[in-house]
């Protein structure tokens, strides 16, 4: 493998990217933005400028994109297609792209101590990170430009890989005596001396020099102590001179900076270089290597802390994004403002519960038995209508039951308008089914009362849902919608809440007093009539008044008069036909209708 290095007009206009293997990547695009590899500092580079095609033997083929505005120069001439070999380069605008030879430390198994730590004198300096931050830079002017740009430079990275590229580039260009910068991952090295060290990203000053060897002992000690550690490989008699014995010509020292967040667990910044020119202190005495490299170690600490904090923030954002698939927005808002365990802890609350079931699913499943994937897609779209409006009106998805969804309002935050929110969601679901081509209708049951809501389940599996009689009642009401031919049925408490709200957009019709299966006490139920039902079936105020008058006769025991009144109503009206059948069956006492499951 080889690396491609981009270098712009400023020292910090730089990145180094590893060329992928030709067997795993056919090509990638270099451009100014929205490309595989971006060069944002050069306005002469188009959004997509050249294609890079990996080849064997560390070579790459470069092809200019036809839409690129400015020319590509190779070997001093304008070129649109050419092969680049290690050490060769091409130029676009003010940016030079150099193909570097493969680095020796790309493979973790080749990471090794410089000539073995036991084979030479090692001067070790441990920097307390708290004290290091308190100590001022000796030359702040040399760092101020990079420090002011650092937060935006790191925060604007659009991926983890882009972040690593920018951080290594900043460190390399801002550390004059550094020859190479690596960001390593060695989370298991603390407990396993032979654990694998992964090179997350690497860069060095030379386009031809291979990677510098890495001291496993230095990385391990830095992770264990959670402090920055500097090692100087030198002879005891010439500790502070550039003529000291080193592991390799380009490596006199290395320091390792651990990143102290869970998001970067086991990550370290590893920088190697040559001994700087001997500095002189105010007393006229030479500065030791620790003092000379103090600013560089402090700067690496600052960059590492910024990167680690950003990674921690990104990890939290990713977790929140993943949690959005499991928690409703109203739950996410509550979690953002409080302790997770406290927010999700089961507790009693006044809830409005909705059960919403697809109509026509059995027929569709029989018709589409030879195309089950399409059926699954259609059902998912239909369930999506339910969930969209439940969540859109600040409800919580409690569960899915086959082709039905359960939602509830009033938890984790109390909602004084829970009845209004749930009823508005029900009408929105009904309207969308009537105006869509999904091929389904719905039946909805709404009930209001006390229930337990929160993280409910066993020690093996939990989910956020609601539990209690009001949940069962909502399910029973949804089942009744089939029998009554009414798409939305409410219990008495929900009806009372709507009437008390003074909102006139809700049209209601009392249906009957029923005893649902499993309930000892009767429940008075009503129909919530949406605009779709009014438009298609012409459920007028007059029809509602005539129906309720017949229902009063039924409740009073005057079944003959009730039957006569119901028969005068339109035959297409589902509740009317249900009451006629009930009277003719002789199973009612004239007040309560028992409805077996």
Image (cartoon, helix red, strand yellow):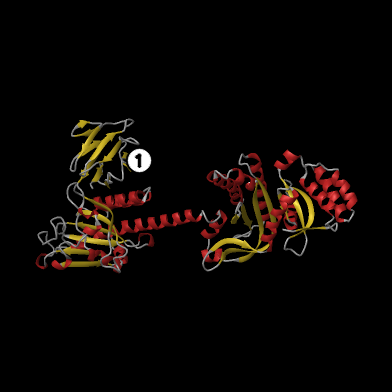
Name the residue beneath numbered marker 1.
35
Residue drawn at 26 percent across, 55 percent down:
182
Relative height, residue 19 to residue 316 (above, below)? above
Q: How many marks on residues? A: 1
Question: Which part of the image, by quadrant, shows the C terminus?
Answer: bottom right
Where is residue 515? Give x, y as percent: 77, 60
| Numbered disc 1: secondary structure | loop
171 left or right, relative to 114: right
Crowd tier of the residue under label 1, counting other residues whose Cα lies within 10 Å: few below 14, some 14–19, many 20 or above: some
Residue drawn at 75 percent across, 50 percent down:
484
User: Can see residue 36?
Assistant: yes
- Figure quadrant of residue 297: bottom left
Residue drawn at 57 percent across, 65 percent down:
456
Where is residue 11? Give x, y as percent: 25, 46
| The one of 538 and 496 positioned closer to us in this rendering | 538
416 left or right, relative to 177: right
Where is residue 139? Give x, y as percent: 24, 56
| The one of 338 and 506 positioned closer to us in this rendering | 506
| The one of 299 and 427 positioned closer to us in this rendering | 427
Relative height, residue 94 to residue 376 (above, below)? above
332 left or right, relative to 137: right
- Figure quadrant of residue 514: bottom right
| The one of 346 and 164 positioned closer to us in this rendering | 346
Where is residue 525? Give x, y as percent: 76, 55
User: Can see residue 137?
Assistant: no
């Amino acid at each position: 493998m080889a690396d491609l290095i981009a270098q712009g007009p400023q020292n910090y206009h730089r990145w180094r990217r590893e060329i992928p293997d030709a067997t795993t990547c056919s090509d990638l695009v270099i451009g100014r933005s929205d490309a595989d590899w971006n060069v944002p500092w050069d306005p002469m580079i188009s959004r997509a400028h050249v294609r890079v095609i990996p080849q064997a033997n560390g070579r790459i083929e470069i092809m200019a994109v036809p839409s690129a505005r400015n020319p590509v120069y190779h070997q001093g001439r304008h070129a649109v297609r050419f092969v680049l070999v290690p050490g060769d380069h091409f130029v676009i605008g003010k940016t030079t792209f150099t193909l570097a030879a493969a680095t020796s430390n790309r493979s973790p198994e080749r990471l090794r101590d410089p000539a073995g730590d036991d084979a030479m004198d090692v001067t070790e300096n441990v920097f307390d990170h708290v004290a290091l931050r308190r100590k001022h830079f000796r030359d702040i002017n040399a760092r101020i430009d990079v420090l002011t740009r650092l937060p935006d430079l790191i925060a604007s990275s659009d991926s983890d890989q882009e972040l690593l590229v920018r951080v290594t580039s900043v460190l390399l260009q801002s550390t004059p005596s550094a020859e190479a910068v690596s960001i390593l991952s060695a989370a298991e090295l603390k407990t396993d001396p032979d654990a694998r060290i992964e090179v997350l990203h690497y860069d060095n000053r030379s386009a031809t020099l291979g990677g510098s060897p890495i001291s496993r002992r230095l990385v391990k000690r830095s992770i264990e102590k959670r402090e920055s550690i500097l090692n100087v490989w030198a002879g005891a008699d010439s500790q502070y001179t550039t003529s000291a014995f080193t592991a390799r010509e380009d490596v006199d020292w290395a320091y390792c900076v651990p990143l102290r967040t869970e998001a970067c667990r086991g990550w370290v910044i590893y920088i190697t270089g040559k001994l700087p020119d001997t500095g002189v202190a105010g007393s006229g005495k030479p500065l030791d290597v620790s003092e000379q490299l103090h600013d560089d170690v402090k700067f690496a600490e600052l960059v590492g802390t910024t990167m680690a904090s950003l990674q921690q923030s990104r990890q939290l954002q990713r977790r929140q994004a993943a949690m959005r698939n499991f928690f409703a927005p109203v739950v996410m808002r509550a979690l953002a403002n409080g302790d997770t365990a406290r927010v999700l802890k089961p507790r009693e609350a006044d809830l409005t519960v909705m059960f919403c079931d697809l109509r026509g699913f059995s027929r569709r499943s029989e018709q589409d038995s030879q195309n089950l994937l399409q059926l699954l897609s259609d059902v998912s779209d239909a369930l999506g209508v339910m969930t969209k409006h439940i969540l859109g009106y600040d409800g919580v998805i409690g569960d899915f039951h086959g082709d039905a969804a359960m939602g509830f309002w009033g938890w984790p935050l109390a909602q004084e308008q829970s009845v209004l929110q749930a009823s508005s969601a029900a009408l929105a679901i009904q309207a969308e089914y009537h105006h869509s081509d999904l091929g389904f209708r719905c039946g909805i049951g709404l009930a209001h009362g006390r229930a337990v809501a929160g993280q409910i389940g066993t020690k093996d599996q939990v989910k956020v849902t609601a539990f209690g009689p009001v949940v069962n009642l909502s399910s029973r009401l949804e089942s009744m919608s089939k029998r009554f031919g009414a798409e939305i049925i409410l219990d008495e408490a929900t009806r009372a809440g709507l009437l008390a709200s003074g909102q006139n957009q809700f049209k209601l019709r009392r249906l009957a007093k029923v005893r649902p299966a499993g309930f000892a006490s009767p429940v008075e139920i009503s129909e919530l009539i949406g605009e779709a039902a009014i438009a298609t079936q012409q459920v007028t105020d007059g029809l509602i008044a005539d129906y309720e008058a017949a229902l009063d006769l039924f409740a009073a025991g005057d079944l003959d008069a009730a039957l006569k009144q119901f028969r005068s109503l339109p035959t297409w009206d589902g509740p009317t036909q249900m009451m006629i059948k009930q009277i003719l069956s002789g199973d009612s006492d004239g007040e309560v209708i028992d409805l077996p499951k």
